[in-house]
Image: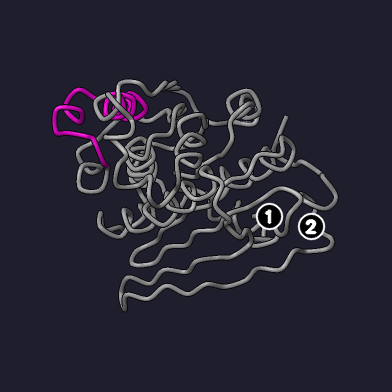
């Protein structure tokens, strides 16, 4: 299919060169649930040429209300979420190269999975994974987009290695994150609304599209989303001059 026709509505915004950049870009999406599946759909519709999707979990019926591209049949057959995303992406645009990994994103495979991509997108639901993404991002020099949600609230921030604050600057309380690591378990599930997760995913995906197309995007700005009163606040985050990760380059999670 002719890309000029497929993307005729977004080329005027991004330019032909920007569209070419997107087509030649590679993105890793870590987590294929509510956030990650929506990000995968939006980035594939925007024309990202190579997408890696990483998730060890399978679809359950409780995922359907907020997980894009997943069906009741996927829940009945316990289809891996990464394969659901791959199928959906290929149905949207068969020319996209999709690598699906049915495995846990971990200290032992993080660098291997992320090496060579242009951007990392956070579709996870826990802080420990984000600290790991952050360390891999800083070490490999790959920008990443943090996206989180809880109840009616969400947050998004672009992190550019060596250009401002990292996630550890934003969330320095490592011990608190470790204590709260089980919050997303079945026993302590995170309450969510599908439209709110999609809103957060849309903001993170818009940042990704702008960055990949070559448009200017400022890193280190936290977008705090409150869907209970329909507000978005932009908060500038300062770099911690003693940050263990982005300043001292001490990697506590990577192996």
State the CA–CA distance, disc 1 to disc 2.
9 Å
Extreme residue toward the bottom, this view: 229
Image point (45%, 31%), residue name: 23
The mark found on residue 127 in the picture is: none
Relative to 41, say whether 246 is above or below: below
Instruction: Tell whether 230 sits left or right of 128.
Output: left
Are the two marked residues, 1 and 2, in contact with CB atoms closer than 8 angstroms?
yes
Q: Quadrant of the N terminus?
A: top left
The magenta stretch is 68-90
Image point (74%, 38%), residue name: 139
Secondary structure that dominates the magenta span: helix
Mark 1 Cα-neighbour bin, 10 Å: few <14, some 14–19, many ≥20: many
The mark found on residue 166 in the picture is: 1
Q: Position of residue 36 (x, y in %)?
A: 39, 41
| Front position in the image: 70 or 26 | 26
Instruction: Classify mark 2: helix, strand or loop.
Output: loop
Q: Which-is-in-front pick, marks 1 and 2?
A: 1
Mark 2 Cα-neighbour bin, 10 Å: few <14, some 14–19, many ≥20: some
Q: Position of residue 104 (x, y in %)?
A: 50, 28
Q: Is residue 79 magenta?
A: yes
| Front position in the image: 8 or 89 | 8
Task: State which quadrant residue 19 falls in.
Answer: top left
Instruction: Tell whether 48 sits left or right of 60.
Output: right
Image point (32%, 34%), residue name: 4
Task: Identify the residue position indicated by label 2 in the image.
Answer: 243
Image point (47%, 69%), residue name: 224
């Amino acid at each position: 299919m002719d890309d000029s026709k497929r993307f005729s509505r977004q080329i005027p915004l991004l330019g032909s060169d920007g569209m070419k950049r997107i087509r030649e870009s590679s993105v890793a999406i870590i987590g294929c649930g509510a956030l990650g599946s929506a990000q995968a759909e939006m980035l594939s519709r925007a024309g990202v040429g190579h997408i890696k999707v990483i998730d060890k979990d399978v679809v359950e019926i409780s995922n359907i209300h907020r997980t894009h591209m997943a069906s009741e049949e996927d829940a009945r057959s316990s289809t891996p979420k990464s394969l659901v995303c791959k199928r959906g992406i290929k149905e949207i645009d068969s020319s996209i190269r999709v690598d699906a990994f049915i495995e846990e994103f971990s200290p032992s495979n993080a660098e291997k999975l992320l090496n060579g991509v242009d951007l990392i997108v956070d579709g996870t639901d826990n802080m420990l994974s984000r600290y790991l993404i952050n360390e891999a991002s800083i070490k490999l020099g790959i920008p990443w987009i943090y996206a989180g949600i809880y109840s009616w609230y969400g947050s998004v921030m672009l992190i550019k290695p060596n250009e401002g604050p990292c996630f550890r600057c934003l969330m320095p309380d490592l011990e608190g994150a470790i204590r709260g690591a089980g919050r997303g378990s079945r026993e302590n599930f995170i309450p969510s609304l599908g439209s709110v997760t999609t809103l957060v995913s849309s903001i993170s995906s818009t940042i990704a599209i702008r960055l990949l197309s070559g448009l200017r995007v400022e890193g280190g700005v936290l977008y705090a989303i409150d869907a209970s009163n329909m507000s978005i606040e932009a908060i500038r985050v300062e770099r911690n001059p003693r940050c263990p990760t982005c300043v001292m380059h001490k990697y506590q999670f990577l192996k």
